[in-house]
Image (tube, grey):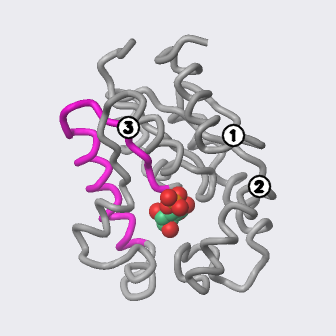
């Protein structure tokens, strides 16, 4: 079944939007779009470099444009929003209007576990909001609480990814959205 809308994944960094989204896209025969990647293509440098040289506000401007481009793209795709894309009310409205939006959730402890490997690999540069010398779990918990209302206002469906592999979470997404039989 395909209801003729984009499938958008929102949620905190580390929850697995890209790994789950890629798998869901493969199973639906759709292209996968990651708004962070669109930003990087447009800017010609990494998200971490944009944060470092131009700051978060400049990144959000690029991110808003990337969200619009992704939602306006054809054919229907699976789109992973950057974790903070829901902070912009226009993004929330557009996403609800022209997509089925799934909020992927996991406890901060699990998010911290999942991002720690990539943090180690990048020396903290991969996820600029976490590269502040504080406990990732604490920072992730604070950000998640601050954004809870924005995620709630954007999403049509909530999927708990705790204890699930990306493949299992993708199956849960497809079942929760009615795209795949139970
Ligand atoms: C951010 C999440 C990141 C990236 C940027 C800011 C956020 O994307 O957009 O570092 O504000 O939560 P992921 O959610 O894909 O890690």
Q: Nearer the viewer, residue 50 or 15?
A: 15
Residue at numbered disc 3: 78
Question: What SS does tag 1 mark?
Answer: loop
Quadrant hosting residue 181: top right
Of the two numbered discs 2 and 3 on the same chain, state the one appearing first in sequence.
3
Residue 68 on image: x %, y %: 26, 47
Residue at numbered disc 2: 110
| Residue at screen point 69% across, 61% down | 114
Residue 60 on image: x %, y %: 39, 64
Residue density around tag 3, few if under 14, some if 14–19, many if 20 or more, within 10 Å: many
Left or right position of 115 against 53 = right
Q: State how far apart marks 1 and 3 are (Cα).
A: 17 Å
Q: State how far apart marks 2 and 1 are (Cα).
A: 9 Å
Above or below, 116 relative to 55: above
Quadrant hosting residue 26: top left
| Residue at screen point 60% across, 72% down | 118
Asked if the residue under mark 1 is in contact with the one under mark 2, i.e. CB atoms within 8 Å, the reply is yes
Range of magenta residues: 57-82
Q: In the image as oriented, which residue stretches furthest toward the left?
A: 74
């Amino acid at each position: 079944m395909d209801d003729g809308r984009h499938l958008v994944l929102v949620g905190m960094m580390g929850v697995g939007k890209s790994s789950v989204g890629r798998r869901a896209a493969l199973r639906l025969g759709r292209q996968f779009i990651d708004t962070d990647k669109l930003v990087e293509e447009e800017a010609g440098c990494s998200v971490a470099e944009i944060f470092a040289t131009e700051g978060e506000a400049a990144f959000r401007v690029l991110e808003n444009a990337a969200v619009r481009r992704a939602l306006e793209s054809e054919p229907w795709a699976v789109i992973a929003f950057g974790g903070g894309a829901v902070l912009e009310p226009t993004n929330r409205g557009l996403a609800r209007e022209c997509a089925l939006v799934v909020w992927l959730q996991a406890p901060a402890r699990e998010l911290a576990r999942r991002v720690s490997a990539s943090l180690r690999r990048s020396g903290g540069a991969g996820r600029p909001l976490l590269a502040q010398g504080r406990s990732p779990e604490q920072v992730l918990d604070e950000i998640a609480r601050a954004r809870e209302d924005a995620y709630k206002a954007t999403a049509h469906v909530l999927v708990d990814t705790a204890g699930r592999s990306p493949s299992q979470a993708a199956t849960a997404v497809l079942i929760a959205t009615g795209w795949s039989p139970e």
